[in-house]
Every structure is written in structure tokens, then in C-alpha cells.
Amino acid sequence: MADILDELEWRDVIAQTTDIDALRKALADGPITVYAGFDPTAPSLHVGNLATLLILTRFQRAGHRPIGLVGGATGLIGDPSGRSTERALNSSDIVAEWVSRIRVQVEKFLSFEEGPTAATLVSNLDWTAKLSAIDFLRDVGKHFPVNRMLARESVSARLSGEGLSYTEFSYQILQANDYLELYRRHGCMLQVGGSDQWGNITAGVDLIRRVEGAHVHALTGKLITKADGTKFGKTAGGAVWLDPALTSPYAFYQYWLNADDRDVVRFLKVFTFRTREEIDELEKAVAERPAAREAQRALAEDLTTLVHGADELARVIAASRALFGQGSLGELDARTLESALAEVPKAVVPALGAPYVELLAQSGLVESKSAARRAVKEGGAYLNNVKITDEEYVPSADDLLHGRFLVLRRGKKTVGGIEVA
């Protein structure tokens, strides 16, 4: 059985463990059951959640049994970890809908085929909804010293600021009870999560020790940061989601393709299943041929395939090539073209009728109509990858792609669009 801890250490994803030597022994004696939880705080997981989900996936590939937990109960409460203000509580209907959507996403990364490593998917609402307030306080709450709860970083940070409600204060007890339930029901011996979950996870470790007298384990992944100081998993348009309706496959691909040279090798280790040898070769390429962006392409292609599938990757690559004159725009489907144009400067007009140079200026690719005229004169102006030589040219309905779009380009690398609404 593969030594998963060696793998995770090489990939530099481990932030904390309760007792790495004891965990290593348990894994060697395995297989063991390991779980990670995902709260429905939005209608989709994002790329930050993906780091934890891939740790769980790696444990399964190393021969262990994974449990994906979706927080149908904890999602109704809200985790105070990493927040300076109280969460707005969502309705039970919204949380239930988001649970369903996130279950589908988690399922894509785990194998449920029968066998010793078959995955299990659960919602903590299944056992929490049956728990009365009296039972919760007597059977679970009595094992939590308040002084320890107050000392946890997620709580103490809030107490020094705006404070927090008893609702969020009790979140750590609910998550700890999840670990206890999974220990009892499935013999779960390890919980993994993000580093901001350390206090909640170790609360579960302590609860199992107090109630069952058993020694279980915790492991958290490192917080992922970017070398340029911007927040990982964020773009100008918001979070990078796994749901294609929230972040298009094209935008998802571009996010990874634009990774900084200083980040790309680390991202390859955390987010792909490439071997040490493959990543070493890509690291050399970054050092020796940075302009080729081989590592970024590998990262973007692997992750787009993993999250959205090979067919979607093919459409995304075709769109990327076509926008820059290396493929046929007419062969792109409307959804892919719309997604691609959403990532470049674009103007929306009510109807056609304006000259090309005016549209070029409206798109933001040039600063004025006179600059647009210069681009035409200099041979660097394109409409749907066709060079425009007439400064007075007025696009017609025949030029529209899918009856809505015009693709404009200045030079080889500056692309924009017009949408007729």
C-alpha cells in the first residue's frame, strides 16, 4: 500500500497532524476510513475546497476508504472559522438545494465501485436532525469545557472583535459530533480539512477520546496563497467555482493558465496527479523556457479535464485558439464563445449600424476612434479573424456569430468583443 503521508509531504500540502507517527502506523496497518466535510455555504464548491477534496481523493487512491460529508445540518448554522462577522443564515430550502448540488460535485472525485476502498457520501443532517436539544446538551455538550472552546482561534478572534452568537459558538460541537458519529457508524479514524478547521477537527478527536476512549487522528492541508499577494481562488469577477454555471470552463481554464511562474509548480503538486518526475520536468521548463508556459498549460488542462471533462477541455482550447486567429470562430458553439468573450473587453450595443472603427473603440481595445483608424491603416485590425482594411466598413448581420457576437482583435494578442443585445 502506497505511503500516502510521504506523498502528501512531497506535495507540501500538510499543515498539521495530531500525531504523525501514530497516523503513519495506522495507515500502514490499514486500510482506514477517512472523511472530509463540505458545508453548503454557497451553491457550489470553489477551488479552495478542491484542495481538501483532492487530499481525500489521494487517500482513496492509496487504498483507504473515503467518506464525503456534506453539511446539511452545519450548513444551517455557519462556521465562524476565518470570519470576522456573523454569517447570514440561509433558509432550510436553500441549504437543502445547495446540499444536493454539492453532493453531485463531491461524487465526481470519488469512486463508489464495490470493494474495500468504496466511497460513502453522507449528510450530517441524517443524525443531527434527530438529536433533541436536551440530548445534545447532556450527551455531547457536557464533554466540552467552555474554557477550551473560548480558547479556539475561530472563537477567540471573534470575541476580541464583534463577538459571535451562541449559534456559531456551538458549531464546533456539531462538527465534533459528526466525527463521533462517523467513528461509530463507519469506524472512521481520520478527518482531513483545511488548516482553518484545525480547532473544529481536534474538538472531534478529543470528543471521541472522552466518549469512546479511542485514539483517532486529524490532518489539515496548508492554506494556499499566491506569490503576488492576491487571494488564491479569486478573480476580478469573484470566486473560482467548480460549477460551470458560476465559473465557465473557459474562465476556469484561463485562471490556471495565468498562474504565476512562482506558483505554478506548487499548484501542480497540490491540484494534479502528475508524478514527481513529470512535475520536475515542468519545473525545469519554467526555469529554462518560461515564455512557453508549458507548466501552466499542463496545470490548466489537467484541472479543466478533472473538473469539467475532456470534451469541455477540447472546446475551451478551440475557443482559445480561435480568438487569437489560430482556429475557426464559426465552429465554436454559442455557450463557449459567450464564455470566452466574457473574459475579454466587451461592449453591448442595441443594434448594428456603427462603423467598425467605432465598435473597436467602444470595446475598449483602443482609446479612441482615431486610434482605431490608425490600427486599420497599419494592418492590425480584425473582425472575426478577418483583416479590416476599409476604415468605413460597417459590420452587418452576416458578420454576427450565432446572431449576437462580433470578435474584434487589435494586433496578434489583444482581443475584445461586441454583443448585440
Image (cartoon, helix red, strand yellow):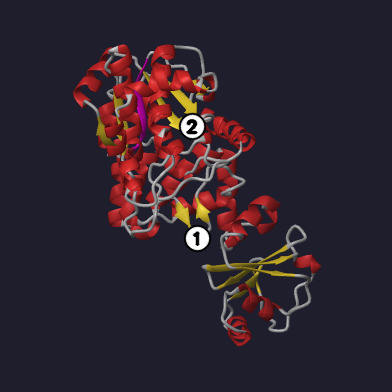
Magenta highlight on residue 308: no
Q: Quadrant of residue 261?
A: bottom left
Residue at (49, 23) in percent of width and height: 133
For residue 200, side relative to residue 376 (left or right):
left
- Res 74 label: 2
Depth check: give the residue in front, 298 or 343: 343
What is the three-letter code of the residue carrying label 1? Ala
Residue at (60, 57) in percent of width and height: 340
- Res 385 label: none
**Vertical arrangement, residue 120 with respect to residue 340, above or below:** above
Q: Tell me the quadrant of the picture where the C terminus can be found.
A: bottom right
For residue 57, side relative to residue 370 (left or right):
left
**Vertical arrangement, residue 26 with respect to residue 52, above or below:** above
Is label 2 or label 1 in front?
2
**Vertical arrangement, residue 320 with respect to residue 397, above or below:** above
Q: Secondary structure at mark 1?
A: loop
Q: Identify the magenta region.
A: 188-194
Depth check: give the residue in front, 19 or 265: 19
Residue 287: horizontal and vertical position, in percent?
28, 55
Magenta highlight on residue 191: yes
Q: Residue furthest left?
A: 21
Residue 125: horizontal and vertical position, in percent?
53, 24
Instruction: Indicate which disc, 2 or 1, sits on the residue closer to the N terminus.
Output: 2
Residue at (43, 28) in percent of width and height: 174
Q: Residue furthest bottom?
A: 370
Q: How many marks?
A: 2
Q: Tell me the quadrant of the picture where the N terminus can be found.
A: top left
* Any part of residue 183 in sight: yes
* Any part of residue 179 in sight: no
- Res 236 label: 1
Q: Quadrant of residue 392?
A: bottom right
What is the three-letter code of the residue carrying label 2? Thr
